[in-house]
Amino acid sequence: MSEPISDVPPYGHAIGMSVQDTTNSRLTLKVPYAAHLVGDPDTGVIHGGVITAALDNASGWAVRISKDWQDDLSMATLDIRIDYMKPATPHVDLLVTAECYKQTKTIAFVRAVAYHDSEDDPVATSVASFMMGTPNQPRS
Amino acid sequence: MQILKQLRDEGRAEDMQALLDHIPYAKFMGVKVDRKGNEITTILPFQEMLIGNTTLPALHGGAIGAFLELTSLITLLFNTQCERLPKTVDISIDYLRSGRPVETFGRAVVTRQGRRVANVRAEIWQDEFNKPIAASHGHFLLTPV
């Protein structure tokens, strides 16, 4: 694996995310509620961008834990579409669960859901696709 | 939203920097606004914490998504008088190039504005305007004044 899952990227650290669980090709991460993540100071609701970052990161990791993942591969996000179902609840941690439901030689397809208590009551959902086998060497 | 009303009362409804300074997450990201007439450009200064891939290195896809969303929101608020911050209904992001660890700029266009929903497209770039690193289109729910 080029970067182990435990290797949280700097932006992941900045918003406080951590991996909670990886079972049956599903990955769950947590973003604890924090004052600097607030997008609407009147309500204390966290900004959509935080949810975007968590969904994006969880989706990428879900590809890495899928059974078809090859250690020498690297990948790049092609696109992600996010639907916001309801505002996140202030002062409550956010959970994100992602699953890579199809992977070909070149593309991986991932869906993810952001929620508080239950995946059946989502804050947001996303679908993303990733290009496999992109270069992952330092820029010259 | 308190700050929107306050800025309007003070005749500074178009002061998007003052608005950004009141949004904790925008301050945390370090987003700035440059205004030339009725044209708004957002600026995301580079910070180490924005990195998502330390090997390349490249900006985090989530940071890029957040910047696109903030750019869309700010442009929408600049063009529309709103009671509250517009709510994002959905946003679709295309990643076009990896984001290098340098300053990033953004611009958005409100492609359609209805009574309740606005469609907004946004693009962000680094050194070359004609080489965007990411683009988005999103729907936003409005609460007009």
Image (cartoon, coloured by chain):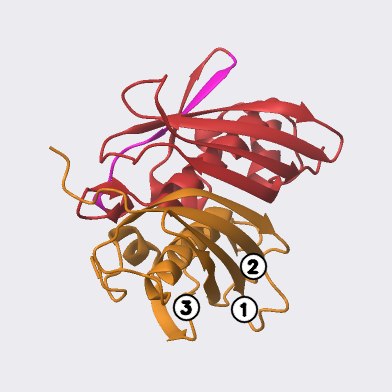
Chain colours: A orange, B red
Residue position marked by numbered label 1 in the rendering: A116
Dot label at residue B62? none
Chain letter for mark 2, please. A
At label 1, counting other C-alpha atoms closer than 10 Å, the crowd grade (few under 14, some 14-19, many 20 or more) is some
Q: Amino acid at mark 2?
A: Ala
Q: Are marks 2 and 1 in contact (CB under 8 Å)?
A: yes
| Quadrant of the image containing the C terminus of chain B | top right
Extreme top residue here? B37
Q: Specify whether disc 2 shares its chain with disc 1.
A: yes
Residue drawn at 47 percent across, 78 percent down = A27
The tag earlier along the polypeptide, 3 or 1, is: 3
* Residue that numbered label 3 is attached to: A27
The magenta span reads B38-48
Q: What percent of the width, then of the height, locates residue A61? A: 40, 69
Disc nearer the start of the sequence (2/3): 3
Amino acid type at mark 3: Leu
